[in-house]
Image: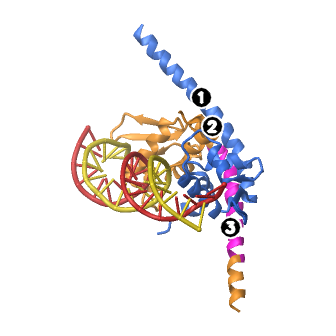
Chain colours: A blue, B orange, C yellow, D red
DNA sequence: CTGTATCCGCGAGGATACTG
DNA sequence: CAGTATCCTCGCGGATACAG
């Protein structure tokens, strides 16, 4: 039997942004200006390797979230930017981001309460 | 060096809903009525195993998205429901869902155009 | 009824070296 | 500059059996 979750728009959306470096790449592209390969690779202090950048870019391209434009020059130049779908996607990150902020605040409060309870028990 | 993405609210939010069965479980709980273990396990035509259900429930609980209430009865009864954070999370699924609908429509149109182009080339 | 306990395959993610 | 090509690790997800 086929899996209906595969055709659920919500599942599709979550899968589109699941991938270790996709949010990072999308955030880099979300200002609207095209970015070059090296630009994306260098503008992070993390250990984003060439293989990972390439694979994540290819998936986003295959999913129609970003476009890849090759300029026939020497040295070669390739630019990545958001598609219309990609732009819409970035736009709706906001509520998710807001939830994350609120959530992290809540988690901190609960952890603090938990630690204080531990202190009281010891004294 | 620490990874700043780990503390990005957006990354945190996406991680919270990434997991093969989490959206499914959340959707089951989103109507507000508590659900029992077996209820969650059975109300799907898919191959959701006990181990997977348990592990996904434990992660959601650890993340403060759902609560687990044990009734000291025989036979044992356990009910799961959304926390305040969990409810807020489900509420913001809507824009993500809407994007998914629009996105799937776009993808279909592009695939159709691509297929028609192939037909024209052959005739 | 509500779970653990094992065992395992597979693929995402990563390190390193090489190339048009 | 913008990538491939290999090789490897690790843990998610799954199958099956057992338990309080």
Identify the element where label 1 is drawn.
helix
Q: Residue B106 in the image: x percent, y percent? A: 72, 66
Circle 1/circle 2 CB separation < 8 Å: no
Q: Name the subunit of mark 1.
A: A
Give the side of residue A27 with respect to residue A5, left or right.
right
**What residue is disc 2 on?**
B9
Q: Bounds of the magenta span? A: B90-113
Q: Mark 3 or 1, which is nearer the eye?
A: 3
How far is disc 3 from disc 1 in space, using C-alphas? 38 Å
Q: Which disc is residue A106 wearing?
A: 1
Residue at image coords 61%, 52%: A17
Q: Name the subunit of mark 2.
A: B
| Callouts 1 and 2 in the same chain | no
Toward which corner of the image does residue D14 lie, by quadrant?
Answer: bottom left
Residue at image coords 53%, 55%: A51
User: Magenta: predominant secondary structure element?
Assistant: helix
| Residue C11 or residue B74, whichever sits in front | C11
How far is disc 1 from disc 2 in space, using C-alphas? 12 Å
State which quarter of the image contains the C terminus of chain B: bottom right
Residue at image coords 72%, 61%: B102
Q: Earlier in the sequence, mark 3 or mark 2?
A: 2
Q: Mark 1 or 2, which is nearer the eye?
A: 2
């Amino acid at each position: 039997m086929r899996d209906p979750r595969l055709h659920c728009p919500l599942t599709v959306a979550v899968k589109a942004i699941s991938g270790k470096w996709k949010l990072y790449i999308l955030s880099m592209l979300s200002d609207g200006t095209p970015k070059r390969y090296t630009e994306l690779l260098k503008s992070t202090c993390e250990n984003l390797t060439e293989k990972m950048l390439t694979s994540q870019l290819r998936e986003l391209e295959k999913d129609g979230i970003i476009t890849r434009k090759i300029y026939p020059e020497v040295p070669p130049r390739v630019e990545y930017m958001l598609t219309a779908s990609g732009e819409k996607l970035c736009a709706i990150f906001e509520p998710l981001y807001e939830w994350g902020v609120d959530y992290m605040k809540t988690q901190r409060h609960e952890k603090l309460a938990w630690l204080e309870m531990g202190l009281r028990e010891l004294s």
